Structures are given as C-alpha cells and as structure tokens.
Amino acid sequence: MVTVWDTVWLPMAAALTPAHVADNQHAPVLLATLPEEVSAVLGDQHDHDPALAALVEGHGRLLVTTKRAPYPHTDDGVKVRRIFHQLRSHAIEHFNGQFKAIFGCLGHVPTRGLRQTRRFALGAVLLYQLTLWHHALLGRDLRVGLKPFLLAA
C-alpha cells in the first residue's frame, strides 16, 4: 500500500499480492500512480533495491530505506534514515492497526482465495478513503469515530 501524509495517513494506491511477491517487485506499479508533488518515498529494509531506487530517482524523488548492514550504521545518511524510519514505522503501524480494527481483520480475513480476499481488502481501502473524505468535507477529526460511523452506515 502507498500512503501519503497530511493530517492523516491516506491510502493513495493499494494492491494485494500473494505472499511470495516481494514489495519491491510490486512497488513500481503502485509508485506510478503517485502525484508529482510526492518528493520522498519511505520504504522498509526490503525496499533497499537498486532497481527500485533508480525508478524512484528517475521520477525526481528520494527513496529513503533502512539498509542491510551490521549495526551501528555509520554512513552519512544514518541520522536522516533513522528519523524517517521512525516516522514511517510509527505512522504505518498506527494506520495498519486502525484499518485492521475497523474492518475486523486483526486475525484471519473473512474470505478465502486470492480473488475474494483482494476484493475484500481493496474494497475496505476504498471505503476507508471515502469515509475520510466524508469526514474531511464535514470538518471532522479524521482520526476519531471512523469505526462507529461505518458500523452505523
């Protein structure tokens, strides 16, 4: 999933792939949909991939990922990467937790098979986006009351 941050972490692109498909292999498809205003892409350790970095940099963006190397890291970018990684980890984990709690998928999803699970997960992403949009239009806090709102619908 690709999210952007403003007042809330908002999913901008999403795909559900089989477990054997690495994120860095599927990332080009999702990154191609990002608005031009996106200047930095924060990734995890498995996104530290030369081909992905070249693609991101080819669009005039900066790819910031943790690196595979023994600790402590001592290169020039370590402090910046540490800050971005903490921000990304904190925000993404909070988003994932909220999203999974709202849609009841803290354990197994209520579907079987890749096609049905894709429909469920991507439908949930769309519904989440529409709910945030609705809350934003009404000037509501985008982090409060999403689950009761959806349950009442």
Image (cartoon, rainbow, N blue to C red):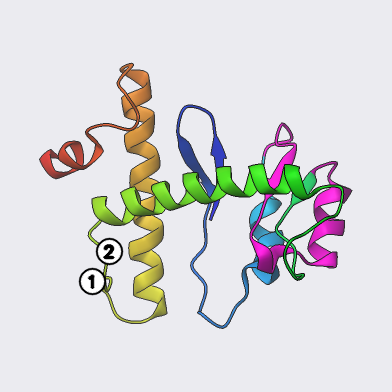
| Residue 68 forms part of the magenta stretch | no
In the image, the segment drawn in magenta is 35-61
Q: Nearer the viewer, mark 2 or mark 1?
A: 2
- Is residue 30 depicted above or below 113 in this figure? above
**What residue type is disc 1 on?**
Pro
Using the rendered view, name the quadrant where residue 8 is placed. Answer: top left
Judging by the rendered image, the residue that carries numbered circle 2 is: 105
Check the picture and name the quadrant holding the C terminus. top left
Who is closer to the viewer here, 69 or 135?
A: 69
Left or right for 133, reference 28: left
> Could you say where residue 119 lies in the image, as x and y percent from the top left?
37, 65
Left or right for 135, reference 5: left
Residues at circles 2 and 1 in contact by the CB criterion of under 8 Å: yes
| Residue 47 forms part of the magenta stretch | yes
Q: Quick one: label 2, few (<14), some, or many (20+) residues within 10 Å?
A: few
Residue depicted at x 37% and y 62%: 121
View extreme (front): residue:
72
Give me the disc on residue 110: 1
Secondary structure beneath label 2? loop
Residue depicted at x 82% and y 55%: 74
**How many numbered marks does the figure carry?**
2
Residue depicted at x 26% and y 31%: 144
> Could you say where residue 85 lies in the image, as x and y percent from the top left?
62, 49
> Could you say where residue 149 lies in the image, as x and y percent from the top left?
18, 36
**What residue type is disc 2 on?**
Cys
Label 2 vs 1, first from the N-terminus: 2
